[in-house]
Amino acid sequence: MPFDWSSIPGSPPILWQGMIVTIQITLVGALVGILLGMVLAVLRLSRSRILSWLAAAYVTVFRSIPLVMVLFWFHLILIPLAAGLLFPGRRLELGLLTALTAFSLFEASYYAEIIRAGIMSVTKGQFSAGLALGMNRGQVMRLVVLPQALRRMIPLLLTQAIILFQDSTLVYVINLDDFFRKAYNIGNTVGTLNEMILFAGAVYLVICTLASGCVRQLHRKLIVSPVK
Amino acid sequence: MTFHLSPFTFHLSPASPLAAFDFSVFLRPSPEAVLNNLSYLLVGLGLSLLLALASWVVAFVVGSVVGVMRTLPGRILPSIGVCYVELFRNVPLLVQLFVWFFVVPDITPLLGDWFKQQVSPFWQEFIAGTVCLGLFTAARIAEQVRAGIGSLGPGQLGAGLALGLRRRQVYLLVLLPVAYRILIPTLTSEFLNLIKNTAVASTIGYLELAQRSASLAETTSRVYEAFTAATVLYAILNLLVMFLARALERISALPGFLGAGGNK
């Protein structure tokens, strides 16, 4: 069956709108996810039983259910509920907000595990040395442990961001027009669905291959760093 | 068959957060299932698990072959392995699924015609889902098999060859059996990921657990109950798999190796 690529030259403006949504989800999801993940990781390793248990519960719950299910929860229950409480009686466009919130909170649970492993890879001696210098636990964590741990984790954090970039296509199930959904829509209306699916796949393939290549280079650079 | 192209749209006003949960909804008869709404969801759980198991078979076989290819001497086979892994890891799962479901049947003349005309919708979704999830997961398994074989070092291979085994025999009798046992914990987490990824098959209309909870939410307007039940079922399945994997790990533990597989 011959392909008909004629719908691709005219579509970049529409696809770019979708790409902006995809990029927004990736950036916000990664940044908020890393910050929240850091908080969760520190809480999980804290001495307070309750806080540690709560952080563990958060991570376990989010990691045991599919992302599609999480998106359903936020799309149909949590975000409409919050919007109803904060702005009663108003009809708001919640699609992007739903995606940003869901991805940020979902990714936080994955980032928390990466960061926890990173923190635990910093030797105990560093912690004791910090305490011996008269810092309190919070200071040791903030000034000694986290900077070293983060540096070691950077490749993993970036790899997770690439996964997030790919997973953002799942906003398909909440009807949000990201890059892939835009491509799908064009293909569906023009009748070149196959071509648009393949084209979108190729775009993801190029971006992700380049990005993971860069991460690998960075990893090689960081590995020879004197921080050990 | 336009129904499985359109994503689910709901226009439910969110009920008051204080509204009492009414789990009796699950005991009500379901128009779709034999018994009641709970059985409707449980069948969905079964279909999720079925898809995961079928995909696992594909993933395990293909992943092992590709993983082994990457450890072989020479240039060509290892680079084919690298290309496979890069291709399947760098395209989103949803896009891959649509390629298998929409594109491949259109561009393969004979097989595609048979697929589109002779195969029932359920099996179309199941086959596309199995191939897609299987090959997607295979790329991850390949990386782990490679790392597992790599962690054994060259000594085992050399010893096998010195005993007069052929390379194929060394892999089948020595390297892989040991590597798999070391890899049980990481393979378990891959299987758990696979179970979660089956929810993506809802986008092509495969009626697995997540999709069924959404449609139950729509038909009964009991969104909270439907999603809570599906979430709990996923969590239970997760715990069950972890429990079984731990048992398997104990049974197959190798003397002389540290318990966890993470020590590469």
Image (cartoon, rainbow, N blue to C red):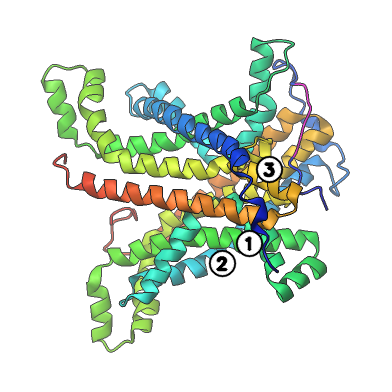
SS label for mark 1: helix
Q: Residue A67: x, y in percent?
A: 58, 40
What's the chain of the residue with tag 2? B
Decide whether the magenta segment is chiefly helix, strand or loop: loop
What's the chain of the residue with tag 1? B
Classify mark 1: residues with Cα within 10 Å, few (<14), some (14-19) or many (20+): many
- The residue positioned 67% from the left and 61% from the top of the image is B103
Residue B180 in view of the camera: no
Q: Amino acid at mark 1?
A: Thr
Q: Residue A11: x, y in percent?
A: 63, 45
Region rendered in magenta:
B8-13
Mark 1 = which residue?
B130
Residues marked 2 and 1, same chain:
yes
**Measured along the vertical axis of the image, is residue B184 above or below residue A155?**
below
- Mark found first going from the N terminus, 2 or 3: 2
SS label for mark 2: helix
SS label for mark 3: helix
Mark 3 = which residue?
B210
Q: CA distance from mark 2 to mark 1?
A: 8 Å
Pointers 2 and 1 in contact (C-beta within 8 Å):
yes
